């Protein structure tokens, strides 16, 4: 009887470890996808291809980066690099999914059409 309970507990523990491993794998894939989106958005916003964004480039192509520009630009150089943005995300100043998703939707979304008011 005790051996059946031990086997059941062992099986449950192994299942939990497997589920956690699978969940970690999914999180890694999601993080990798967010990184790809961030890198693509940065490359698109970097109009002069110098590897950094000025405030104007950030405003035009990555509004969430522009919103947090002074926090990201720790050296007060007037530009931010992709590494600066990643560091800001890692430190919690910006959420990766928030910055990438918001910048992608903000810069590519078409304005909504408005219907005429009914009288």
Image: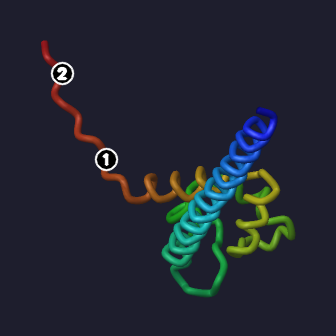
5 or 13, which lies in front? 5
Say if residue 65 shows up in the picture: no
Label 1: few (<14), some (14–19) or many (≥20) C-alpha neighbours in 10 Å: few
Say if residue 80 shows up in the picture: yes
Q: Quadrant of residue 63?
A: bottom right
Residue 55 locus on image (x, y percent): 64, 65
Q: Residue at horizontal 56%, vertical 86%?
A: 49
Residue 39 locus on image (x, y percent): 57, 74
Above-or-below relation of 51 to 25: below
The residue that label 1 is drawn on is 111
Q: Does dot 2 land on a helix, a strand or a loop?
A: loop
Q: Residue at horizontal 83%, vertical 68%?
A: 76
Q: Residue at horizontal 68%, vertical 58%?
A: 21
Cα distance between the residues tagged 2 and 1: 18 Å
Q: Quadrant of residue 70?
A: bottom right
Mark 2 and mark 1 lie on one chain; the one further toward the N terminus is 1
Q: Quadrant of the N terminus?
A: top right
Q: Is residue 11 left or right of residue 45?
A: right
8 or 24, which lies in front? 8
- Of badges 2 and 1, nearer the viewer stands 1
Label 2: few (<14), some (14–19) or many (≥20) C-alpha neighbours in 10 Å: few
Q: Is residue 43 left or right of residue 117?
A: right
């Amino acid at each position: 009887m005790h051996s059946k309970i031990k086997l059941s507990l062992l099986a449950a523990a192994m299942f939990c470890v497997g589920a956690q491993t699978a969940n970690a794998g999914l999180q890694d894939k999601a993080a990798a996808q967010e990184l790809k989106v961030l890198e693509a958005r940065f490359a698109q916003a970097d109009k002069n291809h110098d590897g950094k964004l000025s405030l104007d480039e950030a405003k035009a192509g990555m509004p969430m980066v522009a919103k947090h520009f002074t926090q990201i630009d720790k050296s007060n150089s007037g530009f931010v690099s992709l590494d600066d943005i990643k560091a800001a995300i890692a430190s919690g100043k910006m959420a990766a999914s928030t910055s990438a998703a918001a910048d992608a939707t903000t810069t590519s979304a078409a304005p909504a059409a408005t219907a005429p008011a009914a009288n």
